[in-house]
Every structure is written in C-alpha cells, then in structure tokens.
Amino acid sequence: MCKHRGWLSGAVVLALAGAAAAQPAAGVGYVEFDGVDDLITTPGDFVYPELTIEAWVRPRALHPLYTAGVVTHGSRDVSSFDLGIGQQTDTRLRFFINYNQGQKTIIGNQPMVLDEWQHIAVTYDGQTARLYIDGELDAEKVLGAAILPSGPDALLAIGDDYPGASEFVGGSFDEVRVWSVVRSGSEIAGAMFTPLSGDEPGLEAYYSFDECGSQVAVDRGPHGRHGRLGLSYSAGDDDPERFAYGPSRRRCLSLSSSDLGEVRPVVGLVDEQLAQINAGPPALGWEDIANRHADLHVRDAFECGEHLDRSFVDSASYLAGADEVTFDNCGSAFYRVRFMMPPVVRGGAVYGVANADDLGLAFVNTRPVSLLLTADDVSDLGEDRSFQGHDLLGWPSADPFLEEEVAGLLVPGANSLTVGVCSDAGAFEPAGLEFEAVVQYDCLADWDANGERNTLDFVAYQNAWVSQVPETDLNLDGRVNSLDMLIWLNLWNFGCPE
C-alpha cells in the first residue's frame, strides 16, 4: 500500500543541550521511517580507502537487541560498513566494518537522545575511526583494517543495519552525506547547518530529501547515485514517508499509472489499457493518455528486430529534441500524459521512475528526463544484456528521472510527460509498463507561503508589489509595473494544480 506523503502544519523547533541548533537549518524536507521495515537503498559500490558519513537523525524507536542501522553498505550476509545506534537500552553510536569478515567496532560515549534532532558523523582513514555528535568528537579508536567490499549485490542502505537485515531505525532522517575523504571535526561542524553545492571534493552521495514525493531519493552529489524508497521502485510498505518542516510554496503534481494510490503495471496493447490509466481531473485541463503504438506497428517498413529509425517517430510533433534516441522497437509502446501548469512557473523540477520489461525512456515536453540510456547503451544496442536467449536493452529498468530546472522544460499551460517502453516481443508478450512522476514547482498563487490560497495572498502580493520587491517582477522584464499585477491576478485566479 502506498503511504500518504504529508506536510507538517508548522516548523519543528527543539533544543539540544550543548548544541548550536536543534534541526537541520538547511532542511526543506525530510523522511520519516517507521522502524519496522522502512529504508532507502542505492545500488553501487561505496567502499573507499577513506570514508566520512554524516546525517541528521531524530530517532524514535530502536531495535530491542541489536544495533539499528543509520547508513550502511553491504549485502545480505556481508556488511562493508555500518554507522548505527545501539539498542533501546544503550543508545550510543556504533560504527563497524567488515561484518562477517573480521569485524572491527567502535562504540561512542554519549547516548543518543530519542525524539530530538542530532547531527551524527563518522570518519575512517583506514586506521582510526572517529565518531561525532553535533559536531563534537564523541569517541576515537584504532580499527586498523581496510574496509572490504561486499560483492556485486551490495547496496547503500539508510535506515537499516544492512539490506536483508531487520535492525531498523524508527524516526526522522535528513541531509545524509557520504564522502571518500576524511572530513575534519571543524569541517563537519562548520557545514552541518549548511546545504552543499554538490561538487565538493570527495563528495560521493548527498541526499537532502527536499524533492517532492516519488520513489526516488535524489542524489545531489556529482555522481547522480539516486536512491529508491524501499527495496524497489514500486511503492510499498517499506517506503519512508516524506514531510516538510513547515508550509511553503512547494507543490507536488503527481502523474502515474496508478489506481487508488497503488502503482500497477499497464500490460497488453496500449489501446486496450487507456481506461486503466487516470490522467487527472478534467477540471484542471488534464487529458487522456495518447499513444502511437498502432501507428508504429502498421508501417510497411517496420520489421521486428530492426533498430527504430528516427523517421518512425515524428520528432517534429511527438518527441522533438530526442532525435538521438534510437533503439530496437519490437513490441514497444509509448504513453503520453498532458498536464497543465500555472501561468507563471518557477522552481520547477521533475522526479520519478519508469519501470518496464526492459527499457523505459521518459521525456517532459521535448527533453529526456530518464537516467537509463547512456552512451554505452547507444553504442551497444541489443548486446548489453540477455534473458533466456533474447537480447534486451537496459534490463531491468527502474530508472530515476533527471532533476531539471524549469527553464526550457516546464512551461506555463500545456505540458506533456511521454514514457516509452521497448520490449523484445519474443521474450515478453505483452509488454508492460508502470511509471510514477512528480512535477515539483513553486505555487506563487500562495504568495504568503502558508499552504493556502486566499485573500491574504492577494494582500501580501499587493504590499510587496507597491514596495517594488524584485520577486514581484513576474514577467522577469526587470521592472515591477502593472503588467506584473495583471499576471498576478491571472495566477491567483488559476490557483495551483495538485
């Protein structure tokens, strides 16, 4: 069952003894774990000669017997490293390396406080481990061993002792950072209240959880190692919930192949599946999904197994700007959802996943937003993977979308999300696809950012407009004048699709 992703009614303000502040000052949003099965996972190798892990946590529930994992890396049987909190009766920090391979452990001195925000960190230089709480050194110990790999199935896990274990942390998480360098105590303390730019030397992954809902935890570091809520890109009970620290202009517009909040695959011929997919309330200008499946398969020149020639996709009206994409088109299908945006769109981004039998590609208007297709895929079409004797592309596909700023992507008025799936009809008949995407943008109609659109917003904008506040220059022509007021009136009347 897909969990509700809600907003807090107000900002949380707590006080920690000896701490400079009580919550991540940089935080816009955070995630909440239930302590039962919630976690975030990221495939890939996170083993380095040197390591720093940082996170803001507000623990509420711990395992009764074993260390509960905060940030770990490993497989079902072998953990490369584990930063966690001790059991309910001993809430000190723990860090260990090489579980089941000659484990080395350091235990902190200061107990973690339940139900309060604290910043935690660990550094390891290949010899000495150091634990920090709220920017201050808590413990130091020589472990004297290199961190060992966990194998090709290793995952980075947030909220569990290691993937496949059951030592979960219940509580709030924010600003998780993984580095391949040792950060000094002053560097940790100096940056724990400050958002990162994402290109800091040695930064390997950075999860701020400030994006709108979707199955993707966006990595704002240089490598795009996006995580997934739960163990898969399908919504489930193992997904953390998203929250914001307080009301804001941020809005989330959901587009998905979902039914009553549960994402499910779309299978069979596209023409037979349109009734299964809800493109949104007609009152907001949403339209039914359109497709070119039949058109692609009735052309005389098309033969199964042949690479899709660009002429088969009318790039001028359908996927303009994606002409570089070519792939085998056997059994493929395309889905397009049209959606409306306010007269002024700012701060826009798109997050989501596309799951298909093998290859899922996604476009917002004319720009690709799927991370799946790479230069290697293009040069090695049909040869990179195989299944039961059939060559497949990108198997399996569970693909975060790229985060994109609004300029050149989201536009006022009509927009479209196009999702394509390419399947080998010999191995998969019929093709299947499920997708979930979230359009995030700033609702300027809610000018006072209290979460509601009412007359108070009109008064707030008018006062700012009279004062020539630069933000009220809605047409971005460098002047605050009557044209901006007309745009505001249209914007306020339009409201914000959600």
Image (cartoon, rainbow, N blue to C red):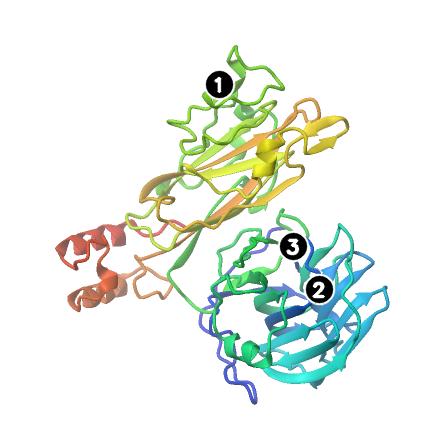
Decide if residue 36 is in sight here.
no
* Above or below: residue 291 compared with residue 90: above
Q: Read off the residue under disc 2.
A: 72
Q: Residues within 10 Å of mark 3 (few under 14, many from 20)?
A: many
Q: Which residue is mark 3?
A: 42
For marks 3 and 2 on the same chain, the one whose residue lies earlier in the sequence: 3
Q: Nearer the N terminus, badge 2 or badge 1?
A: 2
Secondary structure of residue under mark 3: strand
Earlier sequence position, callout 1 versus callout 3 = 3
Using the image as rendered, state which of residue 378 and residue 414 is in the foreground: 378
Rendering quarter of residue 157: bottom right
Label 2 is placed on what type of residue? Thr
Q: Mark 1 and 3 residues: CB-CB less than 8 Å, in contact? A: no
- Label 3, label 2: how far apart the Cα atoms are: 11 Å
Q: CA distance from mark 1 to mark 3?
A: 38 Å
Q: CA distance from mark 2 to mark 1?
A: 49 Å
Which mark is on residue 295?
1
Name the residue nearer the viewer: 216 or 320.
320
